[in-house]
Image (cartoon, rainbow, N blue to C red):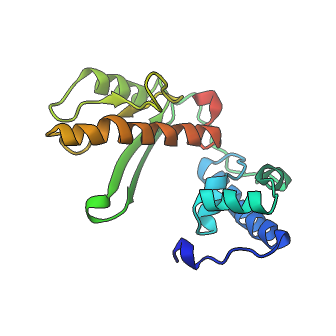
């Protein structure tokens, strides 16, 4: 279902109910994935409503609804099988693919502690260069990196200045903003940033 097919709520109560239901489901899902109590995010709630987060922000503003109040009212799910890391560093791998044809965005992702295998991979990536796959730090704008620091390594070989213009700038800033948003929304724990 596309965003155009989603019916906009007509009353404040209808919006609050829809957002609350989606936020509860999102909090439970995130808690199961992270294996720790987690509050819902605007992005995750919007995804469950099958709308863009900017659309949800617009609806919340229009009906004068505070998402934080809804999120705070949701009891944080308790996940019994909490993970005991025993001092082991975090090491997570992920992949995302959106779009199609020439408009595809495809990333492979490593997330982990600086003092673990991901930290070693970060340092290795910065110091071992490969022609056409120059690693670069993600920056929101010049001299403003997100926390945690993020290394961007192009998957596609950079062959000309047109490719350089796509990676050094738009892609670099987009990745940095995504990391900053994830930290702000608690997806990446602030103490790890």
Instruction: Specify whether residue 153 is in view.
Output: no
Q: Quadrant of the C terminus?
A: top right
Q: Can you tell which quarter of the image residue 50 is in?
A: bottom right
Instruction: Specify whether residue 63 is in view.
Output: yes
The correct choice, above or below, for 30 with respect to 137 in the image is: below
Left/right placement of residue 192 relative to residue 16 reads: left
The percent coordinates of residue 108 (x first, y second) are 36, 47
The correct choice, above or below, for 136 with respect to 105 in the image is: above
Left/right placement of residue 130 relative to residue 93 reads: left
Q: State the residue at coordinates (44%, 30%).
A: 139
Question: Is 90 or 189 nearer to us in this picture?
Answer: 189
The percent coordinates of residue 115 (x first, y second) are 47, 22
Q: State the residue at coordinates (40%, 29%).
A: 117
Left/right placement of residue 46 relative to residue 70 reads: left
User: How many numbered discs?
Assistant: 0
Q: Can you tell which quarter of the image residue 132 is in?
A: top left
The percent coordinates of residue 146 (x first, y second) are 51, 30
The correct choice, above or below, for 174 with respect to 102 in the image is: above
The percent coordinates of residue 44 (x first, y second) are 62, 57
């Amino acid at each position: 279902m596309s965003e155009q097919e989603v019916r906009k709520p007509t009353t404040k109560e209808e919006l609050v109910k829809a957002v609350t239901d989606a936020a509860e489901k999102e909090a439970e899902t995130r808690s199961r994935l992270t294996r720790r109590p987690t509050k819902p995010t605007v992005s995750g709630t919007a995804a469950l409503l099958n709308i863009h987060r900017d659309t949800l922000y617009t609806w919340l503003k229009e009906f004068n609804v505070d998402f934080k109040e809804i999120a705070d009212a949701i009891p944080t799910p308790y996940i019994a099988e909490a993970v005991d890391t025993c001092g082991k560093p975090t090491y997570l791998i992920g992949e995302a693919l959106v779009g199609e044809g020439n408009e595809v965005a495809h990333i492979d992702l490593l997330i982990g502690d600086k003092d673990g295998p991901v930290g070693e991979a970060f340092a290795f990536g910065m110091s071992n260069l490969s022609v056409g796959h120059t690693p670069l730090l993600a920056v929101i704008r010049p001299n403003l990196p997100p926390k945690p620091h993020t290394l961007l390594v192009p998957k596609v070989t950079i062959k000309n200045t047109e490719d350089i213009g796509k990676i050094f700038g738009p892609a670099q800033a987009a990745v940095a903003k995504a990391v900053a948003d994830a930290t702000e929304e608690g997806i990446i724990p602030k103490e790890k940033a």
